[in-house]
């Protein structure tokens, strides 16, 4: 079941909207065309607004159509109705394109665009890209849906991507995303055999699972959200194996808690690592590198380098390649670290993100 929203937009000479007689004629003809698809449609409400005109039409079987005229020369249609799984769509994409073309030709609009119906309901299908564009996924069921102390946790099934972890309405990792983990760890480029490693975050278990295949000396994973690990252990074990089930092994231990608490303890105890993985928050989209998330990123960077061995590396994901401004701000933060660091970058197309993602490898600059 879902509420279907069909969006159709038109461009027109602003003079036709600002002229009252012209505007009424456009609305009259729009209603006549709509009656072909919704025979009992009638105007329920209309009013002038500060930026144009609003008209709401309704049909007896629950269809509501909102038409907005904007003085700047834009007309928008929002056609909305409830649809059960067994029902056919009241307005198919083909029909909405036909409606769009009819109105463009009949009313001589300069431009028209119709979108496939947005299906809104308990089954979330839409997630944002790094730069906040919306993508519709082929999700057909929700496997897990609970809220922890820290975040909303969902595991959904995608017909093309497999099971997918979603945190606070943002896709995190899917069964099809091995390339994400392999690029983050630079598989084939870094040698983890006999190395000491700490993972900050990583609650899905994928990074730990893949690192253990490289025969490290020991890996600590510091994850704050127990419920994330429980859900991934049950529904995502194709990417995490049994590490979230066991929690401790000969060469690894998963610790439930705030990673900063443990980083501070490692700093106090003088404990050092060959690699620190920041598998935490993405680089935020913002005009300036300020605010709570940026402060957290800087705190993590500073603490991580205090627990790294002289030749150690900090490995992390950045953001989508479509966010160059945010990536540049992150690199500016790296360049402010003391001691000075150098970094390399790698990219990979991550299937569940449906875009190219940037990964960083950071270490201390050699001193002469």
Image (cartoon, helix red, strand yellow):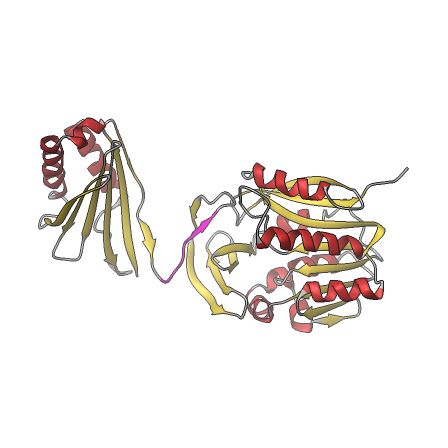
Q: Is residue 124 magenta?
A: yes
Quadrant the N terminus occupies: bottom left
Picture layout, residue 358 above or below residue 111: below
Q: Nearer the viewer, residue 288 or 227?
A: 288
Q: Which of 182 and 298 lies nearest the eye of the viewer?
A: 298
- List x then y, in percent, for residue 240: 64, 62
Give residue 95's quadrant in the image. top left
- Identify the residue shown where x is 70% and y is 70%: 255
The quadrant of the rendering that contains the C terminus is top right
Q: Nearer the viewer, residue 15 or 93?
A: 15
Q: Which residues are magenta?
A: 122-128
Which residue: 10% across, 36% down? 24
In the rendered view, does 275 fall on the left or right side of 299?
right
> Residue at 78% of width from left, 49% of height from top?
313
- Tell me which residue sits at (56%, 56%) in the image: 175
The number of numbered badges drawn on the structure is 0
Question: x, y percentage for residue 51?
Answer: 24, 39
Q: Is residue 156 left or right of residue 89?
A: right
Q: Quadrant of residue 347?
A: top right
Q: Does the stretch in magenta take in 117?
A: no
- As drawn, 278 above or below 49: below
Residue 159 pos. (x, y %):
46, 54
Q: Position of residue 42 (x, y in %)?
A: 9, 49
């Amino acid at each position: 079941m879902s509420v279907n929203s069909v969006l159709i937009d038109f461009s027109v000479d602003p003079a036709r909207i600002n002229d009252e007689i012209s505007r009424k004629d456009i609305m009259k003809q729009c209603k006549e065309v709509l009656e072909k698809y919704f025979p009992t449609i009638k105007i329920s409400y209309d009013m002038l607004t500060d930026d144009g005109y609003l008209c709401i039409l309704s049909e007896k079987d629950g269809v509501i159509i909102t038409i907005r005229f904007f003085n700047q020369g834009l007309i928008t249609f929002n056609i909305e109705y409830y649809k059960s799984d067994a029902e056919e769509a009241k307005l198919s994409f083909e029909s909405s394109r036909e409606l769009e073309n009819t109105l463009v030709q009949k009313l001589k609009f300069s431009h028209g665009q119709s979108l496939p119906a947005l299906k809104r309901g308990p089954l979330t299908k839409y997630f944002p890209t790094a730069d906040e564009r919306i993508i519709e996924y082929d999700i057909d069921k929700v496997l897990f849906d609970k809220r922890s102390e820290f975040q909303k946790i969902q595991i959904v099934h995608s017909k093309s991507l497999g099971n997918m972890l979603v945190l606070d309405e943002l896709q995190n990792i899917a069964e099809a995303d091995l390339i994400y983990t392999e690029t983050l760890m630079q598989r084939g480029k870094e040698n983890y055999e006999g190395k000491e490693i700490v993972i900050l975050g990583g609650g899905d278990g994928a990074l730990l699972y893949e690192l253990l295949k490289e025969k490290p000396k020991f890996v600590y994973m510091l994850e704050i959200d127990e419920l994330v690990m429980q859900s991934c252990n049950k529904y995502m074990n194709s990417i995490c194996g049994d590490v979230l089930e066991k929690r401790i092994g000969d060469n690894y231990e998963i610790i439930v808690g705030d990673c900063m608490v443990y980083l501070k303890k490692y700093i106090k105890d003088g404990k050092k690592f060959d690699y620190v993985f920041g598998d935490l928050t993405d680089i935020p989209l913002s005009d300036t590198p300020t605010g709570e998330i940026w402060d957290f990123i800087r705190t993590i960077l500073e603490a991580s380098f205090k627990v790294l061995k002289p030749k150690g590396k900090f490995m992390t994901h950045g953001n989508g390649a479509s966010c160059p401004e945010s990536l540049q701000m992150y690199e500016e933060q790296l360049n402010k670290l003391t001691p000075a660091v150098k970094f390399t970058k790698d990219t990979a197309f991550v299937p569940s993100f449906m875009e190219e993602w940037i990964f960083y490898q950071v270490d201390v600059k050699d001193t002469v």
